[in-house]
Image (tube, rainbow, N blue to C red):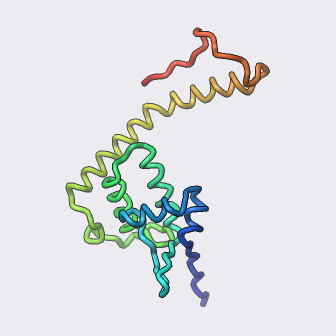
């Protein structure tokens, strides 16, 4: 019989360093309830499991996309209810495990649909713009090629 592999836990500073944010950022998200420690030591040190890194990156991405903190918190609660500390999807979760009302779930669903629609609208534009920039600034002309002529500007649907 194989023994279970111990789950690696991160201190606040380790989690912050790995995510590229300050320790204070992690502490702030913990204080406002967005990022709860998975364990707390006898001395009061917060420890975060591997899934906390994914949640922290999700929080940072959602905030960068302009999602309000209350909706980010709901998304984190939903994720925590349906995933283990290791980040594995829990196939045994039930509706009772989700600490959100149907109304809050509808708000989360609407926000996710809006984000997906915006991504779909912008995906091809971003690829086209990236191709234009790559061609313009990595070719023979180099970085000091100057502004593009008006007839070469990429079309961006906004």
**Which residue is found at the position 50% from the left and 67% from the top?**
51
Q: For the C terminus, which image quadrant?
A: top left
The percent position of residue 107, horizontal first and vertical second, equals: 26, 50
Whether residue 127 is situated above or below residue 10 in the rendered picture? above
**Which residue is found at the position 45% from the left and 23% from the top?**
157
Tell me if 75 is positioned left or right of 140 in this view: left
Q: For the N terminus, which image quadrant?
A: bottom right
Q: Nearer the viewer, residue 143 or 106?
A: 143
Whether residue 38 is situated above or below residue 139 in the rendered picture? below
- The part of the image, by quadrant, that contains residue 144 is top right
The percent position of residue 148, horizontal first and vertical second, equals: 63, 15
**Which residue is found at the position 34% from the left and 43% from the top?**
113
**Outermost front residue:** 24
The percent position of residue 152, horizontal first and vertical second, equals: 61, 13
**Outermost right residue:** 140
**Which residue is found at the position 41% from the left and 69% from the top?**
36
């Amino acid at each position: 019989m194989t023994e279970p592999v111990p789950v690696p836990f991160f201190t606040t500073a380790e989690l912050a360093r790995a995510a590229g944010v300050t320790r204070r950022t992690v502490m702030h998200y913990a204080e406002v309830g967005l990022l709860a420690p998975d364990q707390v030591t006898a001395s009061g040190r917060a420890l975060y499991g591997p899934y906390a890194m994914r949640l922290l990156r999700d929080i940072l991405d959602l905030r960068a996309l302009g999602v309000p903190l209350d909706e980010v918190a709901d998304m984190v609660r939903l994720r925590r209810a349906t995933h283990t500390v290791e980040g594995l999807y829990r196939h045994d979760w039930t509706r009772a495990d989700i600490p959100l009302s149907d109304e809050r779930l509808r708000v989360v669903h609407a926000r996710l649909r809006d984000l997906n629609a915006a991504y779909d609208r912008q995906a091809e534009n971003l690829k086209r713009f990236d191709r234009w920039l790559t061609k313009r600034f990595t070719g023979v002309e180099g970085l000091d090629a100057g502004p593009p002529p008006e007839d070469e500007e990429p079309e961006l649907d906004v």
